[in-house]
């Protein structure tokens, strides 16, 4: 009898050991960066096949259970052009609920990212196409609910941004919204959210330089991108020679991606508080001011297309 008990205990110990050894081995195995890279690469490959685009990542380091570092992130659009690239992304993970299609990240540091919003010859912007794809209920995406993606805070280091319209006409402005290129972008972004077809965020300390020379040294605002509309609220903007304070700066294109015809097809709604505007900054948008260097104090509301702006409650001070 005793011998039988000892034998049973021995089998129990073996089974318990195996039961504990398997998850322990898996735990240590998935801590190996090469294994993590392999797993994420397979997931990215699956998503790429399902969406018909390319999603890639280089080396991946995942510190259980809430810190992810990814090198050389690449997301291409439906035409195989780069939509998003980042040299390094360091992200804290708060919630991953794939059944409910909810992804929530904590603090994210992004090194040398590049974002290109491209409108093709058919008038479709790649970001809008991607958002529609992610928020749809297509069986191919195995999703019953639209994507809800949020990040508590993002720190951008040496970012670049491109706004390209491949069906746009040549611009009469110094800044060409058919081929807008921003570099040296540094900023802190809070409360970043993607919900269905809209993107929203709070921007702090944004600075950049546009390829034609227009420079922003500091921008604090709340930004909403919904459809093709871009709306900034609570704006505090410092350019080379201008100080802009506004409750709202709204850009409403007649059709999505029509920023290439900025003066004719984009309606503005600007509600300025007391601001100082210098013509050396304004010349990038109004070519008639090219050879002027004057300061004007301004407040009030300006709306309409650039070619036929209307003002309300405008107060101007000059010299």
Image (cartoon, rainbow, N blue to C red):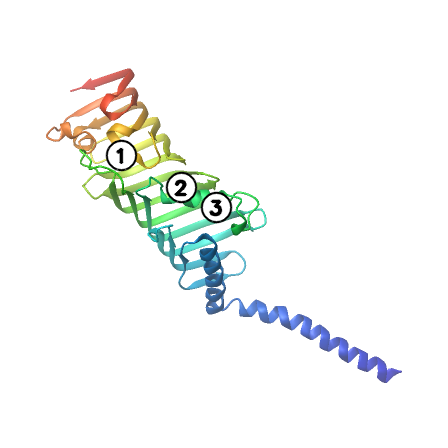
Residue 278 appears at what percent x and percent y? 19, 28
The number of numbered badges drawn on the structure is: 3
Tell me which residue sits at (51%, 47%) in the image: 104
Which residue is labeled 3 in the image?
Answer: 134
Q: Earlier in the sequence, mark 3 or mark 2?
A: 2
**Residue occupying the point 31% across, 26% down:** 268
User: In what element is the residue under mark 1?
Assistant: strand
Q: Earlier in the sequence, mark 2 or mark 1?
A: 2
Does residue 285 appear left or right of residue 96 in this picture?
left
User: 274 and 135: which one is in front?
Assistant: 135
Residue topped by disc 2: 128
| Numbered circle sitting on residue 238 | 1
Measured in 3D between alpha carbons, the distance from the residue under mark 2 to the one under mark 1, in whole angstroms, is 30 Å
Q: Which residue is painted at 50% across and 61% down in the image?
A: 63
Q: Is residue 242 above or below residue 181?
A: above
- Residue 276 — which label? none
Image quarter of the N terminus: bottom right
Residue 237 picture quarter: top left
Q: Dividing the image into 4 quarters, which one contains the C terminus?
A: top left
Residue 287's spot in the image, x, y percent? 16, 30
- Residue 46 screen position, x and y as percent: 48, 59
Q: CA distance from mark 1 to mark 3?
A: 36 Å
Q: Secondary structure at mark 2?
A: helix
The mark closer to the camera, 2 or 1, is 2
Residue 204 on image: x %, y %: 36, 39
Q: Which element carries disc 3, helix, strand or loop? A: helix
Front label number (1 vs 3): 3
Q: 10 Å neighbourhood of mark 2: few (<14), some, or many (≥20)?
A: many
Looking at the image, the residue that sits furthest to the front is 122
**269 vs 102: above or below:** above
Would you say 70 lies left or right of 3 here?
A: left
For the residue carrying disc 3, how many other residues have a C-alpha within 10 Å: few (<14), some (14-19), or many (20+)? many
């Amino acid at each position: 009898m005793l011998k039988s008990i000892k034998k049973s205990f021995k089998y129990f110990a073996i089974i318990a050991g195996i039961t504990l050894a398997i998850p322990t081995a898996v735990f240590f195995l998935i801590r190996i960066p090469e294994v993590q890279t392999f797993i994420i690469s397979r997931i990215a490959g699956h998503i790429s096949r399902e969406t018909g685009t390319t999603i890639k990542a280089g080396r991946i380091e995942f510190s259980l259970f809430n810190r992810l570092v990814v090198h050389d992130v690449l997301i291409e659009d439906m035409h195989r052009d780069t939509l998003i690239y980042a040299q390094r992304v360091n992200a804290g993970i708060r919630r991953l609920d794939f059944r409910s299609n909810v992804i929530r990240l904590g603090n994210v540091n992004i090194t040398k990212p590049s974002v290109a919003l491209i409108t093709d010859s058919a008038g479709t912007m790649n970001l809008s196409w991607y958002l529609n794809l992610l928020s749809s209920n297509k069986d191919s995406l195995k999703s019953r609910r639209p994507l809800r993606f949020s990040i508590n805070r993002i720190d951008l280091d040496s970012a670049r941004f491109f706004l390209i319209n491949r069906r746009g006409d040549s611009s009469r402005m110094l800044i060409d919204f058919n081929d807008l290129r921003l570099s040296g972008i540094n900023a802190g972004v809070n409360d970043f959210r993607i919900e269905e077809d809209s993107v929203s965020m709070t921007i702090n300390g944004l600075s950049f330089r546009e390829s034609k020379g227009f420079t922003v040294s500091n921008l604090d605002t709340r930004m909403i991108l919904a459809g093709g509309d871009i709306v900034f609220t609570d704006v505090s903007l410092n350019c080379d020679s201008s100080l802009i304070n506004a409750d709202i700066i709204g850009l409403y294109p007649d059709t999505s991606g029509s920023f290439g015809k900025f003066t004719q097809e984009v309606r503005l709604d600007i509600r300025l508080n007391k601001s100082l505007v210098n013509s050396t900054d304004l010349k990038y948008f109004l070519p008639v001011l090219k050879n002027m260097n004057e300061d004007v104090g301004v407040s009030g509301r300006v709306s309409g297309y650039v070619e036929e702006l209307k003002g309300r409650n405008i107060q101007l001070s000059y010299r």
